[in-house]
Image: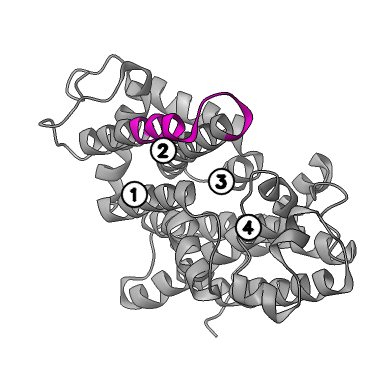
Amino acid sequence: MSIDAPAWTLPDAYTACRAFTKQRATNFYYAFASLPRDKRNAIYAAYAFAGTVDDAVDDAVDNAVDSAIDEARARELHLQRLAEARAVLDRAYGDATGTAPPDSQGWLAVALSDAVTRFAIPKAYFLNLIAGMEQDLDQRRYATYDDLLDYCYKAASVIGLICVEIFGYDPARAALAHEAAIDMGRALQLTNILRDIQEDAARDRIYLAQEDLRAHAYSDADVLANRYSPEFRALMADYTARALALYDSGLRLIPLLNGPRSRACCNGLQGIYRSLLSEIIKRDYDVYSGRVSPSKPGRLLLLFRLWISGATPRWSLR
């Protein structure tokens, strides 16, 4: 496949990205639906790339855990998928010397090529994302909270940095914009981790730092057994407070973004995820008894309110 003469037209490629995002991440899809078309298309293309990389890891891990495929074979499949992702990335950035991406990824290469060119998105952000997914396959425990934050940077903050380039921001405050985007990404990823503790434990993955488990007298065995206890509630309260502090830091990004729709969309996404923390707190941190997820009508109403508040000129730098 060649980007110069793609099998996919650019409009069709972006349509495929939108469909992928809507099917896989409803919160993300609706949070950015009101952006101008060029920004919206680029956001969905970036998300589609991130999603295909994430799926490569999840598929490999699920195969290793849930089928007769042994771990070595699962890793081989994973590395093959990541090689395909790198081929898409290389082609999107104009490197035609490497391996061509598979035909099944043609839509993604075409859309991503246009997005990264149009918005001058650094390739390093996508490479860090791939590195995070590689780490996620091999590393099932994190010794320290700093180790966990480093993983959160690769898994989510780089997506925030990509979004910032698409939104546009005050170049005089670039360092602050990047710092705030990194913290917001970490907040979103910590929220996912807290929501998905039970699901991850079923796959022998514990993201909460080992040092924090010890500090709260809560063990790996407790996580794997889904043991709801006073120690677990204290641990969850600790992590919830850290996530909320990161959200507050991330809010500094909003007034730096170009245009009310960019600010509104950013506020909408962080607000939707922050509401998951509120639901976790309301349940007294019991994430073992069922998945935390607001109803679709409630989510859309909240998103509308957040969009309105984010679009108004009330934001100021703090």
| Residue nearest the viewer, comparing 75 with 90 | 75
Q: Position of residue 256 (x, y in %)?
A: 45, 71
Judge the density around disc 3: few (<14), some (14-19), many (≥20) Cα neighbours within 10 Å.
Answer: many
Asked whether, in this view, residue 172 is left or right of residue 59, the answer is left
Q: Which residue is mark 1?
A: 126
Q: Amino acid at mark 2?
A: Phe
Q: Which residue is mark 4?
A: 206
First to last magenta residue range: 65-81
Of callouts 4 and 1, which one flags the residue occurring earlier in the amino acid sequence?
Answer: 1
Q: Residue furthest top?
A: 7
For discs 3 and 2, the disc positioned in front in the rendered view: 2
Judge the density around disc 1: few (<14), some (14-19), many (≥20) Cα neighbours within 10 Å.
Answer: many
Q: Residue furthest bottom?
A: 318
Of callouts 3 and 2, which one flags the residue occurring earlier in the amino acid sequence?
Answer: 3
Given contact means CB atoms under 8 Å apart, are the residues at marks 2 and 4 in contact?
no
Q: Which residue is mark 3?
A: 32
Q: Amino acid at mark 1?
A: Phe
Between marks 3 and 1, how big is the CA–CA gap? 20 Å
Asked whether, in this view, residue 204 is left or right of residue 131, the answer is right
Asked whether, in this view, residue 291 is left or right of residue 7, the answer is right
Which element carries disc 3, helix, strand or loop?
Answer: loop
Given contact means CB atoms under 8 Å apart, are the residues at marks 3 and 4 in contact?
no
Q: Which residue is mark 2?
A: 49
Between marks 3 and 2, how big is the CA–CA gap? 16 Å
Which element carries disc 1, helix, strand or loop?
Answer: helix
Between marks 2 and 1, how big is the CA–CA gap? 9 Å
